Amino acid sequence: MKTVKEVSELTGVSIRTLHHYDQIGLLKPSGVTEAGYRLYDDKALERLHTILLFRELEFPLKEIRQIMESPAFDPTKALEQQIELLEKQYRHIGRLIALASEIQRRGKTAMGFEAFDKSEIEQYKQEARERWGNHEAYQEYVHRQLRKTPEQSEQEGRDVMIYMKNLGDLRHLPPESAEVQQKVKELQQMFTRNFYTCTNEILSCLGEMYVDNTRFQRNIDQECGEGAAEFIRDAIRIYCKQ
Amino acid sequence: MKTVKEVSELTGVSIRTLHHYDQIGLLKPSGVTEAGYRLYDDKALERLHTILLFRELEFPLKEIRQIMESPAFDPTKALEQQIELLEKQYRHIGRLIALASEIQRRGKTAMGFEAFDKSEIEQYKQEARERWGNHEAYQEYVHRQLRKTPEQSEQEGRDVMIYMKNLGDLRHLPPESAEVQQKVKELQQMFTRNFYTCTNEILSCLGEMYVDNTRFQRNIDQECGEGAAEFIRDAIRIYCKQ
DNA sequence: CTTGACTCTGCCGTAACGTAAGGCATTACA
DNA sequence: TGTAATGCCTTACGTTACGGCAGAGTCAAG
């Protein structure tokens, strides 16, 4: 049985926070002395650790209580939602940084004193969006990857290769033919499903990379036949132009 | 002269917010009717736009007031600080997402109901950090780049090439020689100064890329002499091993 | 003159505590 | 055993940027 101070020193939460959690019913002490001192046992400490974990993930305290009280409340789903929420914030802040940077970069003189007019701000926003676009796709990719198990990742790797092979097998056709272009489209859709929103711009970057990157090119040519990498790149180039 | 409702509809801020801004002295109406109705003119609207810009960038209202009241308060510096703050938040949220994803990825069964113990949480954190590490360096890079003018970027590109050339010029020496290793160190320091915290791991990735990427290799060899790319990669490999 | 739209000034509530203030309880030391 | 030093309690206000009332006055139209 530990007093508030001991718990506080053990876990790093303030005494006031313990009072608060008691007050809102999130963490009741295991017992109280006749003088009204709060006493916590090991089970309470464990509960506190769980609370702190959720708190770190920026769950609101109310929700933490619900999660821990009713087993009906699905923690898996809650976690999923929370991740979505965090990702929203993350993107939002990213855009803010881009906007602020844009102002800093261009407005060194204008920043002097008075007002920006609205059109100017919109201009900043526009430019920030453009400079930020690619980055956001990458973010999405990383986050999606983080949530995958190694087996999932491996499976996806094979999937990609199948699509590449489908496309590479058509390299006797001209890259602008309808059939080839259809396959490019499917490739793009597959990327969007499995990795990130694959815009034409991104797809085009990927296409260039398949040739620019020695290892990629070697792999693709090995799996799909000599010259496949270049063929795929060309097909993508054409696809992205229209 | 516009009433609160008109201003509200024009700018999207609530009437209550206008009241609030009046109350805290952030945006006083240009005039009031004898009945006490607030009236705003175009100058006030402009001021409001500026306020909204700073608000979007998550400046606290108090600070916005200070910035706009006293020209002594340096907006350039304030913007810089704000960006730093946003970046801190950004990294923080990124790590949270990594942590949450890690729990989701591994804890599907464990997530059931009860407590995590502390060691388990630390384990999650550790793994999340590892999976997140490279990503963070990239973030830093993007953010630093965003703030640079095109001329700055260009200058830096030339700087990099100078360092590369310094290193490439030593390719008659063995890559493990002290002189070469010293140059590698300088290269790493230069990256950290100009782009991002260049850990050994990242440096090593860069080294591999100089050979893996066809375009990079060609450029390096062209500028620094035949075989320079491979030599630099080897020198970096050795440097990173100790 | 009434009606409906509009506006005003309070005041309470939010989230998660921080920071006192004022008053017992416990412990340490002389 | 007295007293000082901690430790603990409760109560309550402060923080941020408003949202949402209530109750009352104001304005333009029919």
Image (cartoon, coloured by chain):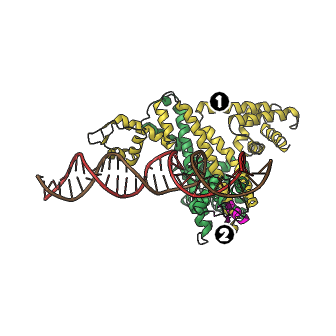
Chain colours: A yellow, B green, C red, D brown
Q: Secondary structure at mark 1?
A: helix
Give the answer, above or below, for where B89 lies relative to A24: below
Q: Residue at 50% of width from left, 31% of height from top?
A: B111
For the record, the magenta segment spans B26-49
Question: Mark 2 is on which residue type?
Answer: Phe
Queried whether the magenta region covers residue B31, the answer comes back as: yes
**Residue drawn where x is 77% and y is 44% of the image:** A204
Residue drawn where x is 26% and y is 39% of the image: A34
Which mark identifies residue A155?
1
- Chain bearing tag 1 is A
- Residue A208 lies, with reference to residue B231, above or below; the image says above
Q: CA distance from mark 2 to mark 1?
A: 56 Å
**Residue lying farthest bottom?**
B72
Q: Nearer the viewer, residue B135 or B20?
A: B20
Residue B158 at what x, y percent from top left? 69, 63
Amino acid bearing label 1: Gln
Q: Earlier in the sequence, mark 2 or mark 1?
A: 2
Callout 2 secondary element: loop
Is residue B44 at least partly visible in the picture? yes
**Residue where numbered disc 2 is placed:** A113
Q: Quadrant of the N terminus of chain B?
A: bottom right
How packed is label 2: few (under 14 Cα within 10 Å), some, or many (20 or more)? some
